[in-house]
Amino acid sequence: KQEVTQIPAALSVPEGENLVLNCSFTDSAIYNLQWFRQDPGKGLTSLLLIQSSQREQTSGRLNASLDKSSGRSTLYIAASQPGDSATYLCAVIFLSSGTYKYIFGTGTRLKVLA
Amino acid sequence: GAGVSQSPSNKVTEKGKDVELRCDPISGHTALYWYRQSLGQGLEFLIYFQGNSAPDKSGLPSDRFSAERTGGSVSTLTIQRTQQEDSAVYLCASRQTYNAPLEKLFFGSGTQLSVL
């Protein structure tokens, strides 16, 4: 059974720091991995999607890497800003009985202090 | 529409009552998912609709939960005889096609359900 773990559960950093969020999964037979951001009282917003054949994806100050064989992904946020404060979730995507299923981690709550 | 729309945004109900939660996916999106997010927990898969195929109901926690999708667009999640443990945020998501792994998943803002 696929399990997705995110460490740390919460993180508080001063503005301007570079930081790394971790996501690990137990079954490497995944199609893709997607990182999301969730603001309080809101739904999830997609940040980056990494194909299983890729090793990383970049969007602005965000860089996501994927090491499928070791079951790990990291989300790197450069020069953090207070507006980055949110919960970050990773989801692994795999095919089961013809359906693309998403298994989510429990998230990392990030607070960037001004 | 421009995004996934869910209504109501908040619902307070009494234990034992039935509730209906609505999801209007992005226009043209054929795949639709319902998830539940309890306080401090991850997202729990409930049900998945793909095109005109039979839905994947494997995540529904009990027979009090049901969902339908009319005309391949709007979906309604119904919870009968609500219990306090049903209190959670119910999130709907859609993606353009059901058989392409590169498609991103888009979420609505959710319905916060509180059962008193």
Image (cartoon, rainbow, N blue to C red):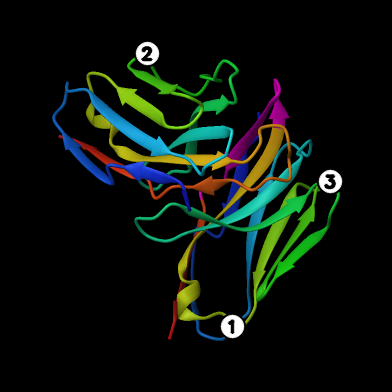
In the image, is residue A77 above or below residue A106?
Answer: below
What kind of element bears circle 2? loop
Q: Which residues are magenta?
A: A95-106
Hey, what amino acid is under mark 2? Asp
Report the residue at 42% width, 32% height from top: B74
Is residue A55 left or right of B4 when viewed as pictured?
A: right
Circle 2: is it few (<14), some (14-19), or many (20+) Cα within 10 Å? Answer: few
Q: Which residue is mark 1?
A: A17
Q: Quadrant of the N terminus of chain A?
A: top right
On whether residue A101 falls in the magenta region, the answer is yes
First in residue order: circle 3 vs circle 1: 1
Numbered label attached to residue B63: 2
The answer to whether B62 appears left or right of A20 in the picture is: left
What whole-number distance in Å separates the C-alpha atoms at marks 2 and 3? 39 Å
Q: Nearer the viewer, mark 2 or mark 3?
A: 2
* Residue at disc 1, secondary structure: loop
Question: Taking A58 as reference, is A46 above or below it?
Answer: above
Q: Quadrant of the C terminus of chain A?
A: bottom left
Residue B17 inside the magenta-drawn segment:
no
Q: Nearer the viewer, residue A37 or A16?
A: A37
Residue A44: mark in rendering? none
Q: Percent x, y for residue B111?
A: 32, 43
Residue type highlighted by circle 3: Ser
Q: Which residue is mark 3?
A: A69
